[in-house]
Amino acid sequence: MPRRRGVGILKTGRKLVVLACVVPLLHPSLASGAGRRRAGRQTHPPKRVRSAPVAPIVQGSTEDHVHVRTGDTLGTLLAARGVGASEARLWLAAAVGVYDVRRLEPRRGVTFRFDRATHALQAIHCEIDDRTLLTLERTADGIRAARAPLPYFIEVKGAAGRIERGLREDATAAGVPPRIVSELAEIFGWELDVESGLHRGDEFRVLYENSWQAGGARPEPGNVLGAELVAAGRPLVAVYFEDRDGRGAYYRPSGDPLSRDFLRYPVEFTEVTSEFSLLRDHPILHRSRPHLGVDLAAPVGTPVRAVASGAVSEAGWENELGRCVRVGHANSFTSLYGHLSRLAAGIREGVQVERGQIIGYVGSTGLATGPHLHFAMDRDGEYVDPLALTAAAGARVPEAARRAFERVQTAVTRQLAALPRSGEPRTVSLSSAGFRAE
């Protein structure tokens, strides 16, 4: 089976540049591919999308970042991450007198830090406003709460270039962080295969956030705010647009949507090492059998994300798949993630997860020749080729939000067009605060 190189997806980051409005997205429809049927299971409606703020990483820990929605409280966010009621009460009590965590503001970021080995909650960082952070830290004397200044600032960078070898190679050579290149594959993935659809002479332009930690030696790349790919003279432009509740998506300048309810890829991968097939020679068992998914090669520990919102139907060991997770989605879809090294904190049967939420980490458990993710999709119990699926487009930007959207897309497209094809990303005068919906 020929191997195909891939770009994969970006770990979703904190959307500090908050724009104006988004509309509900539709669920995917099946394009092609079918496989073995398996026993039916209950599916669940999707929950809302959360995005990730930026927080300092501590050795020996893992972090879960969320973007607050209307109605969220610290208690509900803790419960969604598997923190028991008695444990949660300790953290909530510690916050009393410092900040009312029952009134988290929409679009603010919250970071949960868990011990990598024990999965015990170590710390919580909640954004109170544009300058202040609520910190809750576990200490030898209990949980300590305090207010602190935000330990980072955001700048907007822009880069442009011409395709000579490929998007990954040329954008990386121009100084674009690999995570940003990966997000371009996710943004445009339903419209264009960035690996095979771009050729010499085509162009790329991208605007993205850089988050600088206090005292840090280098920035952490954040989110793509706007991007353009020119393939065979045909421009494809994406503009990020977000409502007051923090729900965001990518749109064309016309207001037509690019985003889908399903992520194109669940992991930032290096290549497709085995494709969907009703009959293949198993590399370990050395006999012909179906391969009802795709194998995406990635280093051990690479985060794996749910491709859509839903509920975990299985989480644990499953024979040849090793440690795996199944998630039931709307419209009778189920996604499966196999050979994981471990599950993310709080992931267990019955837990609701959201599109882009980390559910586990790449490994080689079960029958595997090396670290990779086995990713499979089925609908009504029938396995389908996940790389052959299409997703229905959402609605256009509503008329009530057109004025705000026009302001945003005008600023973004103007900055994209002004980017010179230089060797390094340049700082762009695009004000984050100016895009907030008040």
Image (cartoon, rainbow, N blue to C red):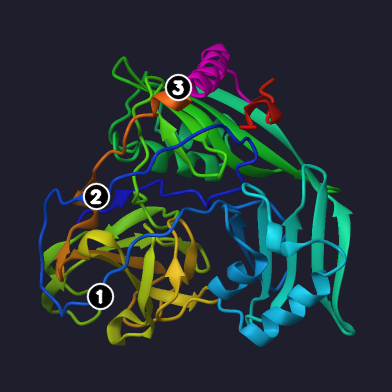
Query: Which picture quadrant has residue 418?
Result: top right
Residue 402 shows which numbered tag?
Answer: 3
Find the magenta span and give its range: 403-425
Mark 1 against mark 3, which lies toward the viewer? 3
**Residue 391 in the image: above or below residue 426:** below
Secondary structure type for disc 1: loop
Secondary structure type for disc 2: strand
Dot 2 crowding, Cα within 10 Å, few <14, some 14–19, many 20+: some
Residue 42 shows which numbered tag?
Answer: 1
Residue 129 shows which numbered tag?
Answer: none
Q: Which numbered disc, 2 or 3, marks the residue that appears first in the sequence?
A: 2
Q: Does the magenta portion include 327?
A: no
Distance from Cα at disc 1 to Cα at disc 3: 39 Å
Q: Quadrant of the C terminus?
A: top right
Q: Does the magenta portion include 417?
A: yes
Query: Which picture quadrant has residue 245?
Result: top right
Q: Which numbered disc, 1 or 3, marks the residue that appears first in the sequence?
A: 1
